[in-house]
Amino acid sequence: MFALSSCIQGGQQEESSSTSVLVRLFVLSCLSENQELRIMAAKPKLYYFDGRGRMESVRWLLAAAGVEYEEVLFQTAEDFKNLIKSGKLMYDQVPMVEMDGMSIVQTRAILKYIATKYNLYGKDLKERAIIDMYVEGMRDLNDMIMFFPFSLPEEKQKILNYILERATQRFFPVYEKALKDHGKNYLVGNQLSWADVQLLEVILMVEELKSDILSAFPKLQEFKARVSKLPNIQKFLQPGSPRKPQEDETTVEVVKKIFKLDEDLFLQHM
């Protein structure tokens, strides 16, 4: 009888112990899940200088997705050096975006992650390939415009002419034809994609160099008017938004000091 009682008591203790372990595991699981939810819900944080550069396309895409974000803007070379010392920069380069518990670097990696997460990257592999082709072309034109403010004064007119020639002869005809052939409101499929957002960004950048650049492209004119009226993008285009202004001489000098760059580097890129 004593043995039976002891066995029952031991079984109860074991059951109680097992239940306690399960409860602890459940609590830990809930805490871990809540922590992950907090990380995923946190605003993305953008690390860059106070200008457009390669981060501007990231700002555009987040704005189009309706995502609020914070920015850490470098003012001095020391600010940039401190970020490098933190060990967060994989290649000691920016842009960098902190989101979803990651420190994401390399512009295209950042943009692809955002486009995928917020359903701006097509519905299937084929659409994603088309979006990539369009975006890579836009990137080529974007880079020309991005480096233009850093060109030497005596080279500016020649480089400006080259940019406008490339825009009107190589790039804009592609997107004009794509919109005409596709017969939809957007470049790919029938909903807004990364390609549409970046196209509008590039159009506005070229218009800053020549206001009537779209005069020979009626489909692009319609596209610009239509996409600019989308609520999230319309908000981003308003004064006081996080959208950065066109680089001027002051911005150029700040960038050179932060990254300790000289004229020769930009001439090589041009």
Image (cartoon, rainbow, N blue to C red):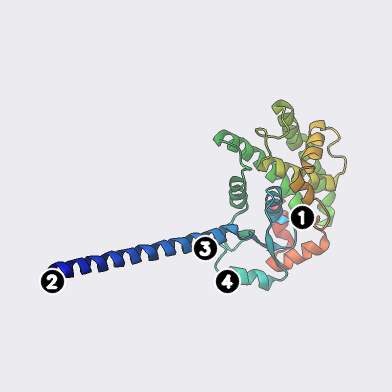
Give the distance between the C-alpha atoms of the residues marked 3 and 1, in whole angstroms: 31 Å
**Secondary structure beneath disc 2?**
helix
Quadrant in the picture for residue 193: top right
Quadrant in the picture for residue 241: bottom right
Circle nearer the N terminus (3, 1): 3
Numbered tag placed on residue 243 in the rendering: 1
Please report the residue visible at 56 percent of the width from the left and 65 percent of the height from the top.
88
Q: Residue furthest front?
A: 1
* Image position of 115 (left or right of 150): left
Please report the residue visible at 58 percent of the width from the left and 36 percent of the height from the top.
123
Contact check, label 3 and label 1, Cβ < 8 Å: no
Which residue is disc 2 drawn over? Answer: 2
Circle nearer the N terminus (3, 2): 2
Circle nearer the N terminus (3, 4): 3
Up the image or down, 147 lies above or below 123; here it is: below
Label 3 CA crowd tier, 10 Å (few <14, some 14–19, many 20+)? few
- x%, y% of residue 82? 62, 72
**Secondary structure beneath disc 4?**
helix
Depth check, mark 3 against mark 1: the one in front is: 3
Numbered tag placed on residue 35 in the rendering: 3
Depth check, mark 1 against mark 4: the one in front is: 1
- x%, y% of residue 131? 63, 38
Depth check, mark 1 against mark 2: the one in front is: 2
Label 2 CA crowd tier, 10 Å (few <14, some 14–19, many 20+)? few
Which residue is disc 4 drawn over? Answer: 85
**Secondary structure beneath disc 1?**
loop
Please report the residue visible at 82 percent of the width from the left and 61 percent of the height from the top.
249
Circle nearer the N terminus (1, 4): 4
Contact check, label 3 and label 4, Cβ < 8 Å: no
